[in-house]
Amino acid sequence: MPIAGWVIIGIVVVLLLFFAGTYNSLVRLRNQVKNAWAQIDVQLKRRHDLIPNLVETVKGYAAHERGTLEAVTNARNLAQGAIGKGVGAQSKAEADLSGALSKLLAVVENYPDLKANQNFLALQEELTSTENKISFSRQFYNDSVLGYNNKTQMFPSNIIASITRFQAGEFFEVEAPAEREVPKVSFT
Amino acid sequence: MWQQIRSNEIRSAVLVAGMLMLLLLIGYFLGLAFLDNGIGGLIIALVVWAIMNMVAFFQGDNILLALSKARKIERDDHPRLYNIVEEMRIASGLEKMPDIYIIDDPALNAFATGRDPKRASVAITSGLLQKLNRDELQGVIGHELAHIKNRDVLLMSLCSILLGTIVILAYYATYMLFFSSMTGGRRSSSGGGGGGAQVIILIIGIVLMILAPILARLIYFAISRKREYLADASSALYTRYPEGLASALEKLGGSTAELKSANKATAPMYIINPFRRKGKPATDLSSTHPPISERTRILRSMAGGVSLADYDSAYRQVHKGSGGVITPAAVASAGAVGLRAAGPEAAPIEPEPSKLERTREVSDLMWRKSNYRTINCDCGTKLKVPPNLKKVNVKCPHCGRIHPL
């Protein structure tokens, strides 16, 4: 076989290897995004499960905070209804729930007896930690989406991503206004 | 992030290969000097190394945990610690929850172990659990989980075994060299007429015996220090709050209590060097950990954000004129990542127990883990009853009430 033939075969093999490698890493990243999303769901569900307990405990000490308690219960039900309706709808409902919860926990400050209750303290630790876990799983989800999107949009892997129809992932939106601040960039 | 791990793996692999070469060289010259057969010595060195590796791979974490007298705890033993570890597991993207161990020791330290992310444990001292607040504990746990995530545990045990084998071989070889030259019982070379060659081999052998352990140790320390920086950077990225780890490190550095159960072999596993001496700057090459003051300074200079790139530029700022610790590829691939405010963002009030409450919590936990029974007396005293007490009743030392056991 002439040398040109070998060269062509070589180029084809290299291209195939590159294609397979890029395709596999795209699949891996997409699975990581899916898995990260499932992690958020686990924590959101945990929060939904904790809330009835919390509402009951607070009711025992602060029954006339009915408005605040109802707002939390409603927000929880709405958030539970939003499950499976897409990233955008779900993050909106969960943000509302977070708002209602923080109002409730602010109200609790006025009830020293409640704050000394062991059951409430344990619940509060669980709730705080669940909030942390939600934000950490969201953080990991967004990091995963960033990595995946970079791969689908950057040259040369974007060619393979568009041939094999890999679509960009959706970020979980920020909820607190303080978080919306643009990250500072320093040029040194 | 993930690219960083991979390019680090390549660099570490080169260093490990360097150590392996040293081991093979030692084995070869040992074989030449004592067996008249270089390959034989080489094979012996490899077999010794392989056996030690097997033990470490299958039982290393259990041995380490047993040596440091660590006790496993469950979720109910200390919900806050469990929650913090779980938070960091989620932030780091580890799939499996690591086992949590407590070492009953007032010294402040922590380590991670386990050959891969699926079989991993973190151990912290009871002193640490007492002294650190939630943010600080989060930073420390983040650092330990980063060691697991970056597979540092596997790498470091691989290296320490290589180092150990080299040291042992060199030690016995020098011993044997002295012994055989003193009695004059040196085997003659079968080739005959190789007196000159024999002497040269002997000289190379002696030089190697002296240099190899030193060289291996330097490589080992270099790898270890690099991994510490990377774990600090990852912890800042996971927690989005470098101040937590910085202030924890400060507390760790300020404590003078020495960890009783640590030894030289397990030292690199801990978050700070358990054998550091006060007043020694330890910036030299003979240290497993970078100096604490430098680590906190880097973490506190991360003004712009918490990505690996931000850590890298903070590192460059602290070490004027030197190259960074994070590879350029990883710096380019990471996006901008902002800091978060102190405390968890969504929770308006932090159920942070006071120092006294933390101390009580931890001591109760340690009593429980030693199988002591607790009896609450009506006068408010908590009686701790040892597990092997033969009596039927105990008397409260404060009010004299009798409690049945």
Image: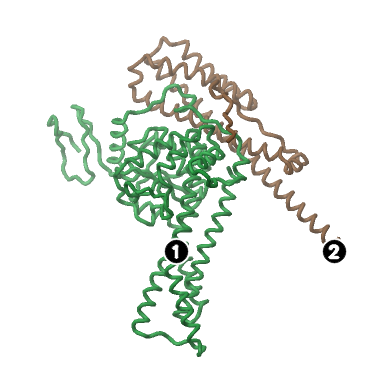
Chain colours: A brown, B green
Q: Nearer the viewer, residue B369 or B128?
A: B128
The residue to which callout 2 is attached is A3
Q: Quadrant where the N terminus of chain B lies? A: top right
Q: Secondary structure at mark 1?
A: helix
Against A13, residue B279 (above or below) is above
Which mark's residue is nearer the viewer, 2 or 1?
Answer: 2
Q: Which x, y percent locates residue A123?
A: 41, 26
The residue to which callout 1 is attached is B52
Q: Residue furthest right?
A: A2
Q: Which x, y percent locates residue B242?
A: 47, 35
Against B389, residue B206 (above or below) is below
What subunit carries mark 1? Answer: B
Q: Evaluate if marks 2 and 1 touch, with contact meaning CB atoms under 8 Å apart.
A: no
Q: Residue furthest front?
A: B321
Q: Quadrant where the C terminus of chain B lies? A: top left
Q: Nearer the viewer, residue B33 or B131?
A: B33
Q: Secondary structure at mark 2?
A: helix
Against A157, residue B403 (above or below) is above
Q: Residue at x 36, y 74 (%)?
A: B175
Q: In the image, what residue type sits under mark 2? A: Ile
Q: Residue at x 54, y 55 (%)?
A: B12
> Do the residues at discs 2 and 1 belong to one chain?
no
The reply to whether residue B204 is in sight is: yes
Quarter holding residue B324: top right
Q: Which x, y percent locates residue B200?
A: 48, 79
Q: In the image, what residue type sits under mark 1? A: Met
What subunit carries mark 2? Answer: A
Q: CA distance from mark 2 to mark 1?
A: 51 Å
From the viewer's perspective, tell me whether residue B357 is left or right of residue B83. Answer: left
Q: Which x, y percent locates residue B265?
A: 38, 57
From the viewer's perspective, tell me whether residue B189 is left or right of residue B258. Answer: right
